[in-house]
Image (cartoon, rainbow, N blue to C red):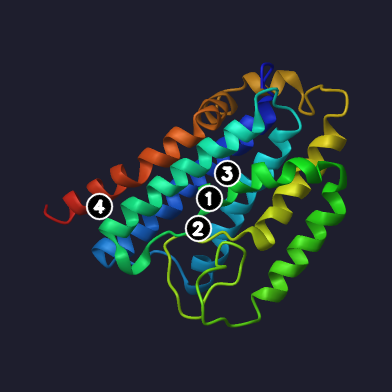
Amino acid sequence: MPNRYWEIDALRGLAVAAMILFHFAFDLEYFAGINVLAGDAWFWLPRMIGGLFIFLAGTALTLSKSNPLKRGATILAWGVIITIITYVAFPHATIWFGILHSIGLGIIISQPLKRYALPTGVLFIALGVWLQTMAFTFPWLLWLGLGPSGMYMFDYYPLLPWLGVMLLGVYAGQKLYAGERSFGLPELGGLLGIKQLCLIGKNSLLIYLLHQPVLVLLVTAAGYL
């Protein structure tokens, strides 16, 4: 986006901050055996945070002047790299189709669907919810939402329902930014705290790629103190 919209950057920055806190809690339990979150939080928090990332990715699609296919392919490629890393380091919990896979492929697939973003978004979410009530014995369509029962991954965001969330983000962008003007009050974007969230939001992909190795190193090192 040549002219950035501070409210989108700030919301993305908020999602990044929440993601780091959640992953810190996860690492404490996984690597140090320290439980700081209750049962339902493990299910709902990552989905709320990931859903915000995916929704904002859809909203940004209506504003960006860059090549969406190139952007989607780049994010998807990073997802593949994460698959390789987790397969080597954590084969029992390999991320076969995580949030970067979902956003990258979703950006590509959503291009011809933008005109019908609202109905297709609702349809895909409904299909995804329905698929989660079913059990499968094969892994080949886990990217779509047909994951085998009992399969564990650190991160899993199949296209159904999450492509639907992205398309709702596209629809929101089409409605809120029809005049290509910032939806947020310009003076709020310069407030202390908001500026920092915007900076984080502008660098969300880089932070996403780097934060877990840093957190794991810190948690592991603390265990030896």
* 213 left or right of 45 in image: left
* Sequence-earlier tag: 2 or 3: 2
Q: Residues within 10 Å of mark 4 (few under 14, many from 20)?
A: some
- Nearest the camera: 34 or 5? 5
Callout 1 touching callout 3 (CB < 8 Å): yes
Callout 2 touching callout 4 (CB < 8 Å): no
Say which amino acid is labelled 3. Gly
Q: Which of marks 1 and 4 is in front?
A: 1
Callout 1 touching callout 4 (CB < 8 Å): no
* Distance Cα–Cα, label 1 vs label 4: 27 Å
- Nearest the camera: 166 or 106? 106
Q: Residue 97 carries which label?
A: 2
* 204 left or right of 67 in image: left
| Residue that numbered label 4 is attached to | 219
Whether residue 214 is situated above or below residue 216 in the rendered picture = above
From the top left corner, tell me how far across and down residue 134 is, in percent: 64, 82
Callout 4 touching callout 3 (CB < 8 Å): no
Q: Quadrant of the rendered structure where residue 160 is? A: bottom right
Label 4 residue SS? helix
| Residue that numbered label 3 is attached to | 104
From the top left corner, tell me how far across and down residue 111 is, in percent: 74, 40
